[in-house]
């Protein structure tokens, strides 16, 4: 019975034996049976136990019945990204030490993993997910689906930060979710992102569109912006009229971010719009939006800021938009940040930009052959393999190195 579980929890927490708790009240055997719910007992005995343990048993029981409601509220706040409510509910739940010994223990642990995702702490999130799998042999249908969702989120984050192929794992895991059991349509958003990383544009658009409808129904304006951002990434925008419409959609979303004070999402949109201009070789506009994105990035010693700085440096280099001495100075700043953040991929990219800025073609392509491409292959970075592989292929053709061009074409889509 519930009272017995509560008594056992606080007895063990205080370091008391069953004999010590029952001294002068009842036998050790009776204490054991009460804790295991194996015998009837009078309210007076529970009152005496509670006084010895220094607890209000009625308040503890009331707290137990509040747990499920608080967990649901915490989950909703995490989905809606309501920062203050997230922290307040966590504090309230943390003040219920008995929670880890109830039927809600797995649910609570899974939401703690979600909380770590909220704070971008992938290490703790992954550790907590693994602990749940190890410590709980049986999960409810909802908990299993929540676990799949968190695992999918983890592999998406790993893919975003290390450019490996964990998006395939994310897709496989997220597709296990049974929406009738889980009833959290937010997962469509993460499935859409996983398909985006997997370059499945149609499925990425399909699932983020489903997520967008859910976010609009629940007035989740921040994630609605995020969903529309992912949908925009699926547009090719090669046709002029399509591009004009795409830019309008971006600027509308940027304006919405300003109204909501969503600075992080505004920075993402500015950066993505810069990428659209970069692909059209409109380097001046690309540089403008990359710089605005950098200025909206709060932590200017983060990997996110470094990525946006590299985009800015690449646009500046390709478009010859800065005086050489100014560009070299900014490249040194980028190289120092890449070293600080221990990011070899950005160190290599900045070295490439520097060699191009110095117009040293022989050293540029030699570095591409000796260091850059081998690293991109070793990390399965298909984006840079394709981008720089094409550059090297064209260089081989232009310099009549046809044998090397043929060999390269076997491993790179040109």
Image: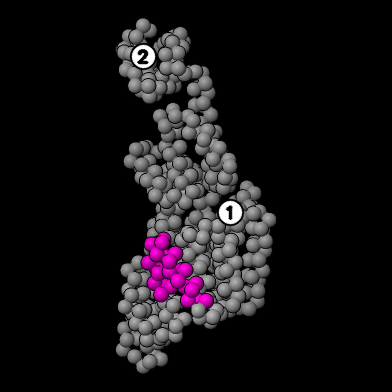
Query: Which residues lie in the magenta part?
Result: 326-351
Q: Nearer the viewer, mark 2 or mark 1?
A: 2
Residue 301 percent coordinates (x, y): 48, 59
State whether the magenta stretch is mostly helix, strand or loop: helix
Q: Which image quarter is the C terminus in?
A: bottom left
Q: Quadrant of residue 11?
A: top left
Vertical order, 78 against 395 (above or below): above
Q: Are marks 2 and 1 in contact (CB under 8 Å)?
A: no
Residue at point 33%, 16% (across, down): 18
Vertical order, 128 against 258 (above or below): above
Element at label 2:
helix
Residue at point 52%, 54% (across, down): 188
Residue at point 42%, 43% (across, down): 144
Residue 55 percent coordinates (x, y): 47, 18
Q: In front: 256, or 204?
A: 256
Residue at point 52%, 33% (across, down): 92
Residue 300 lies in the magenta stretch: no
Q: Which image quarter is the N terminus in?
A: top left
The residue under label 1 is 223
Residue 122 percent coordinates (x, y): 42, 51
Vertical order, 411 against 215 (above or below): below
Residue 367 percent coordinates (x, y): 35, 79
Residue 153 appears left or right of 32: right
The residue under label 2 is 21
Q: Which colour style is shown?
A: one colour
Could you say which disc has been placed on residue 367 in the image? none
């Amino acid at each position: 019975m519930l009272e017995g579980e509560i008594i056992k929890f606080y007895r063990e927490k205080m370091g008391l034996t069953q004999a010590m708790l029952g001294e002068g009240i009842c036998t050790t055997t009776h204490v054991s049976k009460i804790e295991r719910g194996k015998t009837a007992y009078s309210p007076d005995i529970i009152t005496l136990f509670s006084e010895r343990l220094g607890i209000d048993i009625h308040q503890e029981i009331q707290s137990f019945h509040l747990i499920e409601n608080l967990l649901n509220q915490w989950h909703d706040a995490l989905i809606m990204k309501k920062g203050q409510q997230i922290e307040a509910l966590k504090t309230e739940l943390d003040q219920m030490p008995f929670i880890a010994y109830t039927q809600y223990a797995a649910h609570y642990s899974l939401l703690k993993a979600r909380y770590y995702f909220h704070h971008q702490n992938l290490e703790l999130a992954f550790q907590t997910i693994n602990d749940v799998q190890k410590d709980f042999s049986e999960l409810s249908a909802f908990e299993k689906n929540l676990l799949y969702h968190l695992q999918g989120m983890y592999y998406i984050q790993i893919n975003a930060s290390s450019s490996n192929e964990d998006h395939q794992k994310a897709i496989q895991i997220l597709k296990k979710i049974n929406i009738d059991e889980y009833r959290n349509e937010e997962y469509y958003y993460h499935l859409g992102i996983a398909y985006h990383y997997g370059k499945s544009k149609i499925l990425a658009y399909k699932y983020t569109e489903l997520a967008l409808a859910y976010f609009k129904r629940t007035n989740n304006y921040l994630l609605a912006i995020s969903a529309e951002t992912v949908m925009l990434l699926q547009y090719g925008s090669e046709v002029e009229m399509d591009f004009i419409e795409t830019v309008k959609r971006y600027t509308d979303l940027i304006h919405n971010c300003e109204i909501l004070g969503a600075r992080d999402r505004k920075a993402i949109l500015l950066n993505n719009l810069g990428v659209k201009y970069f692909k059209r070789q409109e380097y001046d506009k690309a540089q403008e939006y990359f710089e605005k994105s950098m200025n909206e990035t709060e932590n200017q010693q983060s990997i996110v800021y470094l990525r946006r700085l590299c985009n800015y440096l690449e646009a500046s280099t390709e478009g010859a938009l800065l005086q050489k001495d100014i560009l070299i100075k900014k490249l040194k700043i980028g190289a120092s940040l890449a070293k600080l953040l221990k990011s070899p991929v950005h160190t290599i990219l900045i070295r490439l930009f520097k060699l191009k800025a110095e117009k040293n073609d022989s050293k540029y392509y030699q570095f591409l052959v000796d260091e850059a491409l081998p690293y991109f292959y070793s990390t399965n970075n298909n984006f840079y393999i394709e981008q720089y592989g094409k550059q090297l292929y064209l260089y081989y053709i232009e310099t009549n190195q046809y044998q090397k061009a043929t060999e390269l074409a076997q491993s790179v889509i040109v």
